[in-house]
């Protein structure tokens, strides 16, 4: 249990009490305009207290970055009071609260945006059914987007969060600027690998600058990324090794690998000798803590992740079992709930939006 129970202190001084992190997940619990609801506060609060930290679901940093209905927003100062309630609800018994901030880019549609065309690095649609072709952002809009991430960070600080996570994974706009599939630009924001990294470089430095100048103590900044894309062209492991190396040299507090199985092996022939998680951890080489994730259902998987990471992200299992961490650490894994029925929705504070998210992921294994 030592690996799981030991505290960890980040670069900026924040200490978490154990190595378990509730990973960010879609809940669709916010009001139509992105305001935090009481149900949302209760949902997160019921899953806090035992784990080291909770990372919220994605909060958009500007209106045209909204990816779905029921999504959190941090795009205006008016959202700070609700976000403050959310942060306070998470921060009980020493659990730390981290707000994930993002922009959906081309992974939204004009219906969600009330008739507004989605934007991205380039006017290239994603390879998914019904995807709309986005409008390529002007260079000035890219600069404005970075500034809105900076403003969102300031709001998170004012709301009392312990950190922010930049959502550079799951094909949203940060990843879209890095991907050769979605970024076909030929200006300072795209072209070569180095230029596709330029947006991330400026974004991370901008957010870190806000934190460092804010005077906020123990406020951390993390970065989440996806290791590969299946599109052609798309992000490959060699690209990710470049990205990880660059990010690990920055004064970030952690990196967070996004995948559904911590044992997953790359599709690239040059990276098949060990898991993606192991390759990433080796590339970091101790420069910054890594959150590993994917398929954690108990102590065995948590220990497996900690062989190649400093922190364990727990996603769907935290939806199914709010007291997952407490039961694992107490040695009572036999009491962990692994399935839901409609009768459990109120007990586990699962909204209809979250229910739809779950059933879309693994209906046979999760739903009775």
Image (spheres, grey):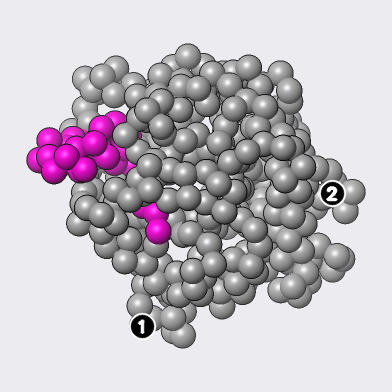
Label 1: few (<14), some or many (≥20) within 10 Å? Answer: few
Indicate yes or no whether the magenta region holds residue 95. no
Q: Which mark is residue 273?
A: 1
Q: Is residue 331 magenta?
A: yes
Q: Is residue 54 left or right of residue 229?
A: left
- Locate residue 31: give its quadrant: top right
Query: Is 368 situated left or right of 84 in this image?
Result: left
Between 33 and 317, the one lying in front of the other is 317
Q: Percent position (x, y) of residue 170?
A: 53, 52
Q: Please report the residue visible at 53 percent of the width from the left and 57 percent of the height from the top.
A: 255
In the image, the segment drawn in magenta is 310-339
Query: Tag on residue 91?
Result: none
Against 330, residue 5 (above or below) is below
Between 67 and 23, the one lying in front of the other is 23
Q: Quadrant of residue 100?
A: top right
Residue 202 seen from this side: yes
Q: Is residue 56 in view?
A: no
Residue drawn at x 46%, y 22% as measured from the top left: 89
Query: Quadrant location of the C terminus?
Result: top left
Tell me which residue sits at (40%, 67%) in the image.
Answer: 277
């Amino acid at each position: 249990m030592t690996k799981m129970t030991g505290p960890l202190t980040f670069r900026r001084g924040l200490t978490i009490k154990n190595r378990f992190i509730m990973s960010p997940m879609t809940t669709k619990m916010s009001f139509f305009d992105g305001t935090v609801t009481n149900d949302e506060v209760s949902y997160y609060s019921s899953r806090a207290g035992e784990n080291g930290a909770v990372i919220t679901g994605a909060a958009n940093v500007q209106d045209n970055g909204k990816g779905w209905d029921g999504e959190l927003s941090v795009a205006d100062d008016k959202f700070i009071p609700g976000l403050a309630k959310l942060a306070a609800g998470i921060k009980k018994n020493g659990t730390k609260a981290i707000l994930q901030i993002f922009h959906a880019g081309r992974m939204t549609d004009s219906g969600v945006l009330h008739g507004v065309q989605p934007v991205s690095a380039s006017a290239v649609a994603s390879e998914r059914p019904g995807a709309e072709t986005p409008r390529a952002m002007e260079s000035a809009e890219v600069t404005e987007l970075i500034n809105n991430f900076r403003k969102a960070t300031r709001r998170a600080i004012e709301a009392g969060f312990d950190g922010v996570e930049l959502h550079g994974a799951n094909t949203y706009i940060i990843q879209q600027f890095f991907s050769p599939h979605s970024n076909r630009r030929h200006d300072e924001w795209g072209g070569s690998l180095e230029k596709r990294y330029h947006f991330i470089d400026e974004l991370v430095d901008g957010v870190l600058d806000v934190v460092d100048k804010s005077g906020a103590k123990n406020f951390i900044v993390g970065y989440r990324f996806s290791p590969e894309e299946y599109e052609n062209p798309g992000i490959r492991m060699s690209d990710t090794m470049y990205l990880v190396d660059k990010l690990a040299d920055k004064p970030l507090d952690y990196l967070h690998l996004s995948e559904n199985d911590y044992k997953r092996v790359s599709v690239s022939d040059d990276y098949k000798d060990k898991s993606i998680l192991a390759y990433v951890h080796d590339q970091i080489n101790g420069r910054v803590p890594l959150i590993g994730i994917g398929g954690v259902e108990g102590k065995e998987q948590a220990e497996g992740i900690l062989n190649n990471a400093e922190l364990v992200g727990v996603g769907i299992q935290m939806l199914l079992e709010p007291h997952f961490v407490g039961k694992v650490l107490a040695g009572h894994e036999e009491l962990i709930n692994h399935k839901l029925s409609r009768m459990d929705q109120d007990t586990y504070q699962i909204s209809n939006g979250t229910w739809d998210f779950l059933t879309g992921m693994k209906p046979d294994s999760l739903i009775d």
